[in-house]
Amino acid sequence: MIFDPENFKDNKSNWVTTFPIYNATETNRQKYVDKYVWEFNSDNAITSELMSSDVYPSNAQESDIKYGTTYDEAKTFTKDNKTIDAALTGAKIIQYIIGAYKRTPSESVNVLEIEPIGVYGYNTDGGKDIIKTWYGLPKTSSVTVNVTSMSINAFAGLNEDILSKYDLVIIGDRGSAQTVGKVFGSHMYNTDRTFTESSKTYNLNANDLTEKAFNKLFEFAQKGMPIALDKNVYYGNKSVVDSNTNMYKMRKSNLAMQLTKTGSSNIVWVDNDEVSDTLNYIYKPTSNISPNMKEYDGTEASVNERDFDKSLLVTFSGNVTVPVRDGSYKVKIYIDRNCDSMFSEDHTTDDTELFYCESDGTGIQWTNGGFSTTLSLPSGLTGYVGWKVEITDTDTGLRTYTSGAFALKNKERTINVLQIKSNSQESHLNLAPGSKFDEKFKSEAGITGFNLKVKEMTKTEFSEELKKNPKLLDDYSMIVMGFADNYGNDNDLSVDAIDAIKTYIDDGKSVLMTHDCMSYRENGTGKKSSWFI
C-alpha cells in the first residue's frame, strides 16, 4: 500500500494518489475515528481506493475539494522540526498511520506544571532539561522550555485558556511528608476535610480540581495535547488521590473511556522524572494578526490620540504564520474594554468584549491567506486597552491566540472621588493632592488623559455634610471606603449615610471597599456600619 513517493511527487498534474486518504469517509463519522486511522467508505479494496481515479480526477482544479493526501501534504505532516527538505520515507508514512510518528518541538515549549502545593520540580534549568528529554531531545537542545508552575488551588482560579497557551500540562504529587500528614491527611488530592491539632479543629477546603478546571484539562486531552501525569495520578492510586475527587477522574482508565476522538494516545505517566512514552509535540496554528495601532510600551510616544466622544475604527490584519497545513480557521477578536484582562465571551450586550464573531459567539470562518477586518470600537474607550486574537483550526479544533495592548489618549477629563476615612486613625493610603498616589496618577495623565480630584472626609464629616446636602454624592464618580485597620468596626456612619451609599451602589456607581470594611458591630441603630456591603 505504500509506494515510493519519489516516483510520484512530480506527478501532481495527474493527481496520482500514493498516500493514505484521510477524508475518504463520511464527514459525520470522522469524529469517531482516531486521528491516525483512515476509514474507507467503499466496497473497493483499500489498495484500489488509494489509486482510484475518482479520488483525484484528471481534470481536477486547484480550487476543487480533494479527498486525499498529496505528496507535499504528507511531507508537511511528517517532517521533523518543520525542516522543509526533510526526507519523506515509507517508514515515516507507516509510523504516521499507526500513530507511532512523534513530532518534536523546533523552537519553544510552553508548559503548565500543577502540583498539590507550592513545591515544584520543573521550573528550574534542570527541570526544563528533563522536559526536553520527554520529547526525545537532548538536554543540550536549543529548544526553549517555558514553565509556569502553580498549586492545584491556583489552577482552580486560573482565568486562562490552557489549550491556547500551553503545549504540555504536567500534574504531579510533590509535597513534604509534614504537609501531607497535617494538612492533607492520607491524600495529596482530597475533598473538604477537618484537621485537629492541640484540641482545635480546623475546616479545610478541598485540594482538588473544580469542575471547570477538570473540563479545561479534559478538552486539552481531547484535542490530542500531551499531558504528563504523575504515576499515582495516572493509575488512580487511592492512597494519593481520594476516589471522590475530580482529580481521580484524571486517571488514564477514566479518560480513555471518555475520549471519543483523540487524546489518550498523548497521555503519559511520570515516575522519577521519566515518562512512560515519548511525547508527541502538537503544532498549533499561530498568526501575526494585530491592530493598526501603536503597541503600548509605557511611553507617551506610544500613545494613540483619539476623540473620546466618537467611535474608533481599528483594522486588524495579518496571516497564519505557522500553519500545520493549509486549511480554514475561525477567528475571534476581543477588546478588554473594562481593563480586567479577562476578555469576556459576552457578545450580545452593550458591554461586549467579543467584537469579531458570529451571532452565536463562535469565530468567523477564514481560509488561510491574508486576513483583514475593521472594527468600530465604542466611544469613551480610553487609556490602556488590551486586545486578543484567537485562531481555531476548524479541522483539529486546536486554537492559539496573540495578544497585546494599545493606549488611547483623549481630551482631558477630571474624575471626582470621595474618600471616606476613619475617624480614629490616618488612612494607610492617602489619595489627596500632594500624596504619593496623587503624584503617580499625575505622572500617567499624559497617557490616560484623566485628572483625579480627591475630596477627603471622615465618617462623621460625611454624615454631617449629607444632612446639609442630601445630593452630595451626585458630585462624585467614585467613593473610596478606607483605608484603615478596623475600618468597619468604627460605628460612626449615620443611618442616612449608610442608606445614601447603598442607593449609590444600587444606581451602578463605583465604590471601592478597602481593608477591614466588614464588621459584626452595629452603629446603635440596628444597622451595621458596613451593612450596605
Image: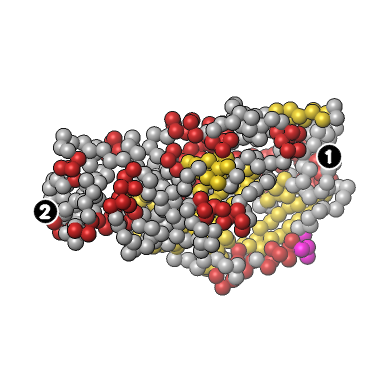
Among the 4 quarters of the image, the one containing residue 40: top left
Which SS type dominates the magenta stretch? loop
Residue on which the image places disc 1: 489
What residue range appears in magenta? Answer: 432-436
Tell me the CA gap for discs 2 and 1. Answer: 85 Å
Q: In the rendered structure, which amino acid carries the disc numbered 2?
A: Ser
Give left or right: position of 368 versus 454: left
Quadrant where the C terminus is found in the figure: top right
Residue on which the image places disc 2: 58
Q: In the rendered image, is residue 322 in sight?
A: no
Element at label 2: loop
- When the figure is inspected, residue 441 is found, relative to residue 478, above or below; the finding is below
Q: Where residue 424 sits: x, y (%)?
A: 88, 47
Residue at 56% over, 31% down: 236
Q: Where residue 145 sits: x, y (%)?
A: 54, 57
Residue at 76% over, 34% down: 182
Residue 160 on the magenta span: no
Q: Nearer the viewer, residue 481 or 242?
A: 242
The total of numbered circles placed on residues is 2
Residue at 61% over, 51% down: 122
Which mark is first along the chain, 1 or 2? 2
Name the outermost residue toward the left: 59
Q: Where residue 367 sits: x, y (%)?
A: 31, 54
